[in-house]
Amino acid sequence: MPLDTSSLGQPVDLGQVARELKKLWESTGGTQTRASLVNFAVLCSGAEALENNTGMISNFTREHACRAILIARIDEPGAPPVRTWINAHCHLSRAGAKSICCEQITFLINSGSEQMISNVLYANLDSDLPLYLWWQGELSAEPCEQLWNSVDRLIFDSREWPDLGEQVPRLQAVLAAASARTILCDLNWTRTLHLRQAVAQMFDQPENLALLTDVRRVTIRHSPGGESTALLFASWVSAQLGWVATERSGARLDFRAATGDDVSCELQESEGAPISLFEILSGAGSVSIQRTAGSPFFRAEVRLGDRPASSHLLPASTDELVNLLDEELTLGGRHRVYLKALSALTPLLAEAVA
């Protein structure tokens, strides 16, 4: 089936991108204003990903002024080495008098190496604005230092990775090759943001906090295909509480608490939200946080000894990709808690932990 390029805009020669963009803005007669605060690059695989990503970029530019650079890699004998298009996504300003527009430059690269991708990307950045790079799919086995050393935010979704045990070391290699200012933005981590906030809020109460000194069992229920989300969340819990992984057997994770006690964590798969249940059982009671699919709330329940159970409603986020991206890019800081959780995740990637 021939590639439908109608959504990609105007085809241009590779060496004429800047000139054609200038002509594009001159043709508007001043009715449209170009806006750009960051370079937002999306790297994907397969020509079929271009249309979906263009739609995503159009939604993204409603809240984020940027120059968008969409690069898709294909391996198609006989196809041109590089095909290029330019486009603009325009939205009415709040005043409604003038359209605010963001540029999109699209490249379809045939059999491109990371070095070639790097050359195309850096030749088309918008001046010295920050670079946000969304790498979709699996990371390369041998990262190209030139590609990574100017990235300010590296966006990825570890839920897409079929083998965490293979990809996490690659992520660590990318981080070693990247600039010291590079921030890792894992959308799989962002999926758990409101759940982590709900858990923290539940244990703000001193009487609930006391439950964490005698945890015996943890249950985490995740959606089909979402084991990586559950593992990342379990790693956050263990890192925050100072637990050390001792063994993993399939869906069972075993930890040793700072007190020397053993803690068992069971991962369960069920239809529903990315994580639909988090439950902690201790000798003195329990805390459970549940969410049904599509619900904007978590329902938390606390049981302490013989007291009546207390219930709470806490906000949850939507699970759509653009919303996760918006949520992630509003967060500041170095994501040190994520790096701490990632370190705790590493020993859980083997079936047996020494």
Image (cartoon, grey):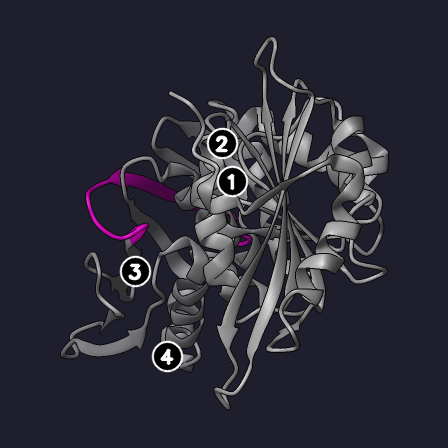
Q: In 3D space, how far apart are the residues under numbered discs 3 and 1 (Cα atoms)? A: 35 Å
The amino acid at mark 4 is: Glu
Q: Is residue 273 magenta?
A: yes
How many other residues sit within 10 Å of disc 2, few (<14), some (14-19) or many (≥20)?
some
- What residue is pinned by disc 3? 283
Q: In 3D space, how far apart are the residues under numbered discs 2 and 4 (Cα atoms)? A: 40 Å
Q: Is residue 136 visible?
A: yes
The amino acid at mark 1 is: Ser
* Vertical placement of residue 6 versus 284, above or below: above
Q: Give how far across and how far down residue 129 sits, in percent.
A: 80, 62
* Vertical placement of residue 88 versus 266, above or below: below
| Label located before the other in sequence (4 or 1) | 1
The amino acid at mark 2 is: Trp
Where residue 35 sits, quadrant-wise, is bottom right
The residue shown at (20%, 77%) is 311
Out of 236 and 91, give the one closest to the viewer. Answer: 91
The residue shown at (55%, 38%) is 136
The residue shown at (84%, 48%) is 179
Q: Quadrant of the C terminus?
A: top right
Q: What kind of element bears circle 1?
A: helix
Of circles 2 and 4, which is in front?
Answer: 2
In the picture, measured across the screen, residue 210 lies left or right of residue 135, that is left
Of circles 3 and 2, which is in front?
Answer: 2
| Label located before the other in sequence (4 or 3) | 4
Q: In 3D space, how far apart are the residues under numbered discs 4 and 3 (Cα atoms)? A: 13 Å
